Amino acid sequence: MSRFRAIAALAAGALVLAPQVAYADTTITAAGSTALLPLVKSAAELYQNAHSDIHITVTGGGSNVGIAQVAARAVDLGDSDVIARNQPELVDHKVCVAGFSVLTHPGVGVKNLGKKQLQDIFAGKVTNWKQLGGADTKIVIINRPRTSGTRGVFVHTIMGGQALNESGLTEDATGTVIAAVKSTPGAISYAVFAGTKTSKDGHSSTLEGIAELSIDGVAPTEENVTTGKYPIWSYEHIYTHGPPNKDVSRFIAFIQSNSKLVHQLGYILTRDMKVTETDR
């Protein structure tokens, strides 16, 4: 066999043996809220399983990051707990409602606080749980970064115009907040129900290792959110730059219509709300 024919034969064999790589026809990108991240990520996995020609990448970064990236057309979907203000080019798709808990380390010895007491804690005016009838333990505030929609919701619904005290800790995602509260005596923070609660057989309970506070005697439950009795909640928004294309629109509709997944992950269906707000 000539040298040329030998090389040709080897090349042909390589073509036969080379693995066949399948590429998705369409890629959808999403970024933003870590409070909404579990729902969008789980929905993406289910949707891709049913649509082999679609590939969906989902990242966090915070609501303001999601809004900024979709406004710059860096992603297809900008996930946010807060309204994108002064962004007329963005189209809002409300996919569900999220409740947010005020959570503490279990050892603080307090189960209920008034809104004014929460303002005093997070403004740095009250520094020891003993001042609130709890343990003689220093209060450790764990905030979210300024890019966080969860922080925005908390400030909007609780702080009444007062600034957050920044002398404590800062954690940039729901999961790291939960871990920090569990491991830090005296800690207090705020996080989405999807992170603070665990669901089994249709019933939810507080995640082990943390405590959820009632606010003015109202417990952080789905029912109390839907009736408007519990104050810390928001619509969960997915923004697109202009009207979405067919593939993006179908994926958003898949999230909105998947009531089983919404409930399973600790969110609330928009249609179940008995109150309506225009500024959330």
Image (cartoon, rainbow, N blue to C red):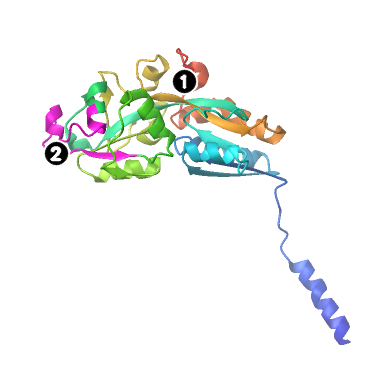
- Amino acid carrying mark 2 in the image: Thr
- Amino acid carrying mark 1 in the image: Asp
Check the image and report above or below for 5 versus 271.
below
- 131 part of magenta stretch: yes
Give x and y (percent) for residue 140: 22, 40
* Residue positioned 16% across, 39% down in the render: 138
Front in this rendered view, residue 261 or 184:
184
Q: Is residue 243 left or right of residue 96?
A: right
Give x and y (percent) for residue 99: 40, 26
Q: Is residue 256 left or right of residue 272?
A: right
Question: Upstream in the sequence, badge 2 or badge 1?
Answer: 2
Q: Is residue 237 left or right of residue 228?
A: right
* Residue positioned 39% across, 19% down in the render: 225
User: From which residue to which does the magenta span run?
Assistant: 120-143
Quarter of the image where one finds residue 166: top left
**Residue 279 marker:** 1
Q: Which residue is mark 2?
A: 137
* Residue depth check, mark 2 versus mark 1: number of the one nearer the observer: 1
Helix, strand or loop at label 1? It is loop
Residue 81 visible in the displayed image: yes
* Residue positioned 35% across, 15% down in the render: 229
Q: Is residue 57 left or right of residue 148?
A: right
* Residue positioned 30% across, 36% down in the render: 189
Give x and y (percent) for residue 228: 39, 15
**Residue 230 marker:** none
